[in-house]
């Protein structure tokens, strides 16, 4: 049973435009949400996170929105750059500590066209 | 400060064999988590080790076992390999007390079971 769902396997956008990556979850116990970026032959690297007590967190070109009632979050990248092309994983945990178990979605492959 | 390293990079085994994968945690980190990423899937939590003790386990059978050493490096052992064990195995190190966004992943070991 997939507790974190990324239903779109891929997304292609033009350089300079906005990329919107969506994620849904089913477990009401999730309290902390993270986005990871993964390049081939590398491990996932942390991008941005949000606590369940917030509905928005922004870091430079990256913004994560959380709609807790809909159990939905999204990652916005503005403006998109070719170097953003990678696999993006949405992850969730029941608490915000470093020893928390992360539950990942299947990932979305983002391609940014020059 | 060295990051998380894993060895070997790639490994090919046959069904029924046993395998040991290794992870060196980032300097100063005392917690290691292991994840399995099957093709087309997101990473799935196997177990976590904190100060040489297992500190949580995902939905994996007992033939998946681990160790953590006094220097906080870790091993993942898989006995009686099955074809479905073919995957990328990721380890993540963290420091207890830090945030969930401070789990740092290694590049992974690609295991192929024939």
Image (cartoon, rainbow, N blue to C red):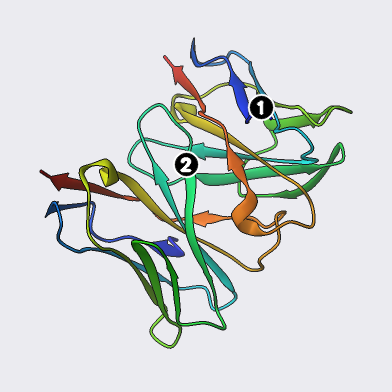
| Chain that bears disc 2 | A
Asked which quadrant contains residue B32, the reply is top right
Q: Are marks 1 and 2 in contact (CB under 8 Å)?
A: no
**Disc 1 and disc 2: Cα gap in Å?**
16 Å
Report whether residue A80 is seen: yes
Q: Which residue is mark 2?
A: A44
Residue in view at x 86 percent, y 36 percent = B52
Which part of the image, by quadrant, shows the C terminus of chain A? top left
| Chain that bears disc 1 | B
Q: Secondary structure at mark 2?
A: loop
User: How many marks on residues?
Assistant: 2
Along the line of sight, the residue nearer the viewer: B84 or A2: A2
Which class describes the residues within 10 Å of circle 1: few (<14), some (14-19), or many (20+)? Answer: few
Q: Secondary structure at mark 1?
A: loop
Along the line of sight, the residue nearer the viewer: B41 or B96: B96
Which class describes the residues within 10 Å of circle 2: few (<14), some (14-19), or many (20+)? Answer: many
* Residue B21 image offset from top left, x and y in percent: 63, 21
The residue sitting at the front extreme is A60
Q: Which residue is mark 1?
A: B2
Which part of the image, by quadrant, shows the N terminus of chain A? bottom left
The residue sitting at the bottom extreme is A69
Left or right: A33 as drawn, with respect to A40: right
Vertical relation: A55 (above or below) A23: below
Residue in view at x 38 percent, y 44 percent = B41
* Residue B22 image offset from top left, x and y in percent: 67, 21
Left or right: A28 as drawn, with respect to B71: left
Residue in view at x 27 percent, y 61 percent = A7
* Residue B99 image offset from top left, x and y in percent: 68, 59
Report whether residue A106 is seen: no
Left or right: A106 as drawn, with respect to B28: left
Along the line of sight, the residue nearer the viewer: A64 or B69: A64
Left or right: A103 as drawn, with respect to A58: right
């Amino acid at each position: 049973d997939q507790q974190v769902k990324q239903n779109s396997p891929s997304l292609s956008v033009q350089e300079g435009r906005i990329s919107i990556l969506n994620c849904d979850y089913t477990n009401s116990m999730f309290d902390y949400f993270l986005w990871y970026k993964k390049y081939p032959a590398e491990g996932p690297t942390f991008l941005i996170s949000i606590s369940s007590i917030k509905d928005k967190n922004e870091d430079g070109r990256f913004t994560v929105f959380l709609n807790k009632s809909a159990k939905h979050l999204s990652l916005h990248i503005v403006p998109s750059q070719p170097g953003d092309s990678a696999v993006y994983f949405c992850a969730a945990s029941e608490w915000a500590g470093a020893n928390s178990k992360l539950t990942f979605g299947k990932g979305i492959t983002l391609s940014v066209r020059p | 400060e060295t990051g998380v390293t894993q060895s070997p990079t790639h490994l090919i085994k046959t069904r029924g064999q046993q395998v040991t994968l290794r992870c060196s945690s980032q300097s100063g980190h005392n917690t290691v988590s292991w994840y399995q990423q099957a093709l087309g899937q997101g990473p799935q939590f196997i177990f976590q080790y904190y100060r040489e003790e297992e500190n949580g386990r995902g939905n994996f059978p007992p033939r998946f076992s681990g160790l953590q050493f006094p220097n906080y490096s870790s091993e993942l052992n898989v006995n009686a390999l099955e074809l479905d064990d073919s995957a990328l195995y990721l380890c993540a190190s963290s420091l207890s007390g830090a945030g969930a966004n401070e789990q740092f992943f290694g590049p992974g070991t690609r295991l192929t079971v024939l």
